[in-house]
Image: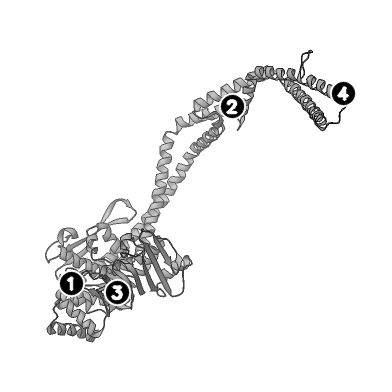
Amino acid sequence: MLHSLAIRNIAIADNVEIEWQSGMTSISGETGAGKSILLAGLSMALGERAESGIVRHGEKRAEVTASFVVNRIPEAIDWLKARELDDGDECILRRTVSQEGRSRAWINGQPVPLTELRELGQTLIDVHSQHAHQSLLRSETHLKLVDEYGELENEATEVKHAWIRWQGKVRKYEQLKARADDSDARQQLLAYQVDELEALSLQPGETEQLEQEFKRYAQTETLVADSYAARQLLEAEDDSPAAISLVKQALHRLRGLQDDNASLSNALELLDNALIQLEESRHDLDHYLQSFEVDESRVQFVEQRLDTIHSLARKHQVRSEALPEHFEQLVQELEAISTDAASLDSLEAEILTLKQEYQSKAESLSRHRQTVAERFSKDIEEKMHQLAMPGARFKVAFTPHERASPDGLDKVEFQISMNQGQPLRTLSKVASGGELSRISLAIQVICAEHSTIPTLVFDEVDVGISGATAEIVGLMLRAVGERGQVICVTHLPQVAALGHHHCVVSKVQQNDRTRTDIKPVVKEQRVDEIARMLGGIDITAQTRAHAEEMLMQHQRAH
């Protein structure tokens, strides 16, 4: 049950707080006073979409906090416990929207995504809109209403899931079958390609290694010539000047000098080190030159091996170094084709089982729907008769789907006859706008009477009716409120007077700013509000007496 609602900076509502009670609460007020703001705030708390334009002019953000008592809502308690968001009997939903359009949400103080706010909200409140009659023109709405009335949603969900599992296997079978039809030629090609690459037996990294080796062979002549020339410059085989012999000569001359000068000693030390480095370089060059004993058969092997690798890479349209990975992919595809035939047989058996499961669940759901539809039609007819349509007849007509559907075997359509002796026809082709509104109201009241959701909001669902019919609507809504909590926004005094409680929305001018407010009214204030709804701006003593009589009459009756 909704316990309290606090609205901050939504449109012209700067600071609105109200506590709610069980039973039926009527909400009234002048047109434009802000009744829609109240519902916008409630919708915002339940996770519905909210634009940045909802923020009151001059403020940074809009905020709404809704407090619910959930101790008698098992579905909500289970949902909260599953997400570790439960906090005793109370559940607090909070939502903010900034001027930039950024939205944040909390459940019992814990930040949550809006999707979770919406999920939880569906277990707490059911909102019946004044435009609900428009959806009655769509046949998919009819099936949903029958399922809701008969509490068949879980059974319908099972049928839908059974259909999804069945069709998923059917799609997989069709894909495999299409692949199998083309598999013979593909299998022969794959087998040839796999044998070809298997004979190559190319190892990961081998191509790069062979290309480096081939590149070295191609550069052998240049490498040997330049390396040998460098070696000659270090120490020539003839008597021509070379670096090592020149350094030795320099050392020989300097060692004969008799001088303890530090610079001379340093020069000798550096030349000694240079000689050591030069001789080591000559040794390394000799070793390097000795490595150039080229194996012509190895060179030929490398050239032929690389030629084969590059040719196959071009043939398979992949990079040479990617051939090993390509080979593995071909092997896997060949194995998959080999197992497809066995998979098709297995899938055929699975599809048959899943189809039988779907058929069984769908047939059971169809039987239950038809049983429920009889009661539903009878209840709707009764309510229509009460709503000044005495000769009306109502029927839920069933036709089979042409093919299996996730909704089951049934197509449902509401049919109606407004006068005795006239045949039943499609709702959209018979009912006028006013009649459609009353039919919609009858259906909403019937569904509300069977709803497990404790709080029901009716937003001006009484549009298009008046007089005695309006009083009957009020009685219907009050009866629903006896079993839980009903919040009803109305313009009709006959409906407002039947509420257990009454709140008035008003617009207030203060400090050059306009704000909306909502307050409960009792006794004389409530008489004044009913009188305003009856007589408009000029309230006469007669109008006020009529209002007082309406309230007294309902208090005595209930």
Which numbered disc flags the more N-terminal residue, 1 or 4?
Answer: 4
Whether 331 is drawn above or below 437: the answer is above
Question: Could you tell me if the residues under marks 1 and 4 are in contact, i.e. CB atoms within 8 Å?
Answer: no
Estimate the spatial distance between the alpha carbons at disc 4 and disc 3, rounded to whole Å. 121 Å
Query: For mark 3, what is the residue?
Result: 486
Question: Could you tell me if the residues under marks 1 and 2 are in contact, i.e. CB atoms within 8 Å?
Answer: no
Crowding at label 1, few (<14), some or many (≥20) Cα neighbours within 10 Å? many
Residue 544 % position (x, y): 16, 83
Whether 378 is drawn above or below 498: the answer is above
Query: For mark 1, what is the residue?
Result: 387
Whether 347 is drawn above or below 215: the answer is below
Q: Amino acid at mark 1?
A: Leu
Q: Please tell me which residue is depicted at 46% across the width and 70% down the height of the picture.
A: 86
Q: Nearer the viewer, residue 349 or 491?
A: 491
Query: For mark 2, what is the residue?
Result: 200
Q: Amino acid at mark 3?
A: Val
Question: Could you tell me if the residues under marks 4 and 3 are in contact, i.e. CB atoms within 8 Å?
Answer: no
Estimate the spatial distance between the alpha carbons at disc 4 and disc 2, rounded to whole Å. 70 Å
What quarter of the picture does the C terminus occupy? Answer: bottom left
Question: Could you tell me if the residues under marks 3 and 1 are in contact, i.e. CB atoms within 8 Å?
Answer: no
